[in-house]
Amino acid sequence: MGGLMGRAIDATGVQFKLLNRSRGPAVWSPRAQADKSAYSMWIRRALESNPAIEWIDGRAGALLTTAGQISGVELEDGRIYRCRALVVTTGTFLNGRVHVGRDQQPSGRAGEPPSVELAESLRSCGFTMGRLKTGTPPRLDRASIDFSGGEAAGVFHVEHGDEHPVPFSFSTTISPSNRMACWLIHTTPDVHRLVRLHIDESPLYNGQISGIGPRYCPSLEDKVMRFPDRERHQLFLEPEGMDAPEIYVNGFSMSLPSDVQERLVHALPGLEHARMLRPGYAIEYDFIQPTELSSSLEAHRMPGLFLAGQINGTSGYEEAAGQGLMAGANAGLRALGRPALTLRRDEAYLGIMVDDLVTRGCLEPYRMFTSRAEYRLLLRIDNADLRLTPTAHATGLVSDNHWDRFLERRWRFDRNVEAIRSARVKVESGQTVAADQWLRQPSSRLDALIDSRQIDWQEPSESAAAGIRAVERLSVETTIKFEGYLRRQVQSVERGLRQEHRRIPAPFSYARVPGLSNEMVQRLTEIRPDTLGQALRIPGVTPAAVAVVGAYVERWAHDHE
C-alpha cells in the first residue's frame, strides 16, 4: 500500500525467516531482524528526499480546537501550528514512567523526557484514558560473550536465517541477504529461583506499577510466577546491528533492580562473564480507549484528530506502523475533503486490527495474530499486493510507476494460472491428468510441476509458467491448490457483507430504539459503529438487537429522505 517499512527492512535487515513453514500458507509469517542504525538512516533518507515533507522540531504540548474540531497544535515552547488534520503517535511517552526495581522516574524511554502536557491536554478533552505497561530486556556487551565457547558447550544453539529469504516488499527485486546469526539459549532453575527470591523488589508485583502488561510478551517475572511448572523458557541473543556493540536478550524483559539483573544474566549458561551495558526496565504510559475512534482512526469527539500506535492500546512495531499508515492516509484524505480509507476484515489484517480496536477496545496491550482472522486463507502474504494495491492506487498511496509494475505482475499471475489450468501432467500409470488437478494433491508442489519433464504445456506458452518469480509461484500454487476452500470463504464473505455494508447514520439515536437494554444503548452510543456488521462485533450486543437496530435504521433513512 505504499508504506516504506517493507522496503526498508529488505534493504537493511540482517536476518530473514519465514515462520510456520510446516503449516499452511494461511499462517506463513515473514520475520526479519533489523540493523537498528541502518534501518533508521534508510527511513530518514527516504523522508528527507521527499520535497513535500516539512520538518518541525519541538515537543507537542496542547491540542487546539475550533467549534469542536482540531485546528492546530501548540508546542511546549509556545509556537503554534494550524492544521486541518493532526495525527498523534505518542508511543510510550504519554505520561511515561520508567521502573527499575524500586527506582522510578518520569520518562518516555530511557534517558528521554515524557510527554506530560499533551497527556493533560487529551485528558481535558474528555477522552477515556487508561494505563498500560511494556518492558525491555537488559543489553549486553557483545565483546564480552564467548559465542563459539557457548556453541561448543552446547548451551548456545546458533540460529541462521532462511537459505532463500522471502522479501517483505513486492517492490524488492533483489532477494534480501542473511548477514548475521542469532543464538538460542534457555533459562534455568537457578534463574527462576533468583526471580522468586527477589519478586517483592519487582514493580510488577509490589504494587508500584498499575498499568496492565502484554499477555503475549510477558516479562521474566510473569513467566516465572505465572508458569511455575515450566523448567525453562527460551531466549534469543540478537545483535542490534552489523557494527553495534550491543546484544538484545529477546524474551528477558524485566524491571528488577539493576544488581539483581546482573546476577540473572550471569546465571544464564554461557553468560557467566557477560557485561551488562544497561539494565532492562518496565515503562507504563497513558493510552486512549480506541473505542473513541471511528474505523478511519479519527476521534469521534474531535473531528480532524487521528491517533495511531500505542496511544490506541496496541503493542508492537508492525501494529504501530500499520495504524500509522491508515491514520496518515486518512488525515491526508480529510484535509483534501475526500472520503476516508477503510479496510474490511476480509481484505486485510489492517482491517481486522482496526475493527478489533474500535469495536472492542483494549483491556491489555493488543497484538495482531493470524488467529484473529475469520478469513485468513484469503489474507496471505503472497497475495497482499493483489488484494490491496488497487485500493492504494485509487486512494493515491502508490505512484503511477508502482501501479504499472503491479499491472504487469497481475497480468503474469492471471496468465500463469491459466497456463497451469490448461496443461497436462503424465503420471506413473502413463496416463495424463489436468495439471491443476494434480497440483491439488496435498504432496504436490508447483516447483516440481514446473521442473518436471512430464508436463505438456498448452497455451499460453511454456515460458509463461516457467518464469514465475518465487514469491509469485506461491500465489499461483495457493490459488489452484485451495480453490474450493477459497471459493467457500468468498461466499461466506459475500453473505456477511450484505449486513456489513448497511451503514448507520452518525446522528442515529439508539435511545429511541425500543427493546434495547440500557447497557446496549450505552455501548452502541459510546462506540457509534459505522455499520451493522461492526455493531454485531461489539461485546454484549446480540444479533437480535442488531436486527432491531437495522429495522429502525431503515425507517430513519426513509423518514430523512
Image (cartoon, rainbow, N blue to C red):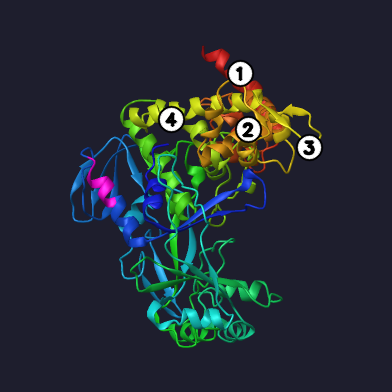
What is the x, y in percent for residue 40?
Answer: 32, 56
Residue type pointed to by label 1: Glu
Position of 549 compared to 284: left or right?
Answer: right
Q: CA distance from mark 4 to mark 2?
A: 18 Å
What is the x, y in percent for residue 411?
Answer: 49, 25
Q: Which is more foreground, mark 1 or mark 3?
A: 3
Marks 1 and 2 close (CB-CB < 8 Å): no
The residue located at (70%, 36%) in the rendering is 542
The residue that mark 1 highlights is 554
Position of 337 compared to 20: left or right?
Answer: left
Give whichever of discs 4 and 1 has the lower sequence position. Answer: 4
For label 3, the crowd category at 10 Å Cα-Cα, with few meaning under 14, some 14 to 19 and many 20 or more, is: few
Q: CA distance from mark 1 to mark 2?
A: 39 Å
Callout 1: SS: helix
Give whichever of discs 3 and 2 has the lower sequence position. Answer: 3
What is the x, y in percent for residue 209?
Answer: 50, 70
Callout 4: SS: helix
For label 1, the crowd category at 10 Å Cα-Cα, with few meaning under 14, some 14 to 19 and many 20 or more, is: few
For label 2, the crowd category at 10 Å Cα-Cα, with few meaning under 14, some 14 to 19 and many 20 or more, is: some
Q: Which is more foreground, mark 3 or mark 2?
A: 3
The residue that mark 3 highlights is 428
Give whichever of discs 4 and 2 has the lower sequence position. Answer: 4
| Quadrant assignment for the N terminus | top left
Q: Which is more foreground, mark 4 or mark 3?
A: 3
Residue 166 magenta-highlighted = no
Q: CA distance from mark 4 to mark 3?
A: 39 Å
The residue located at (52%, 44%) in the rendering is 291
Q: CA distance from mark 1 to mark 3?
A: 62 Å
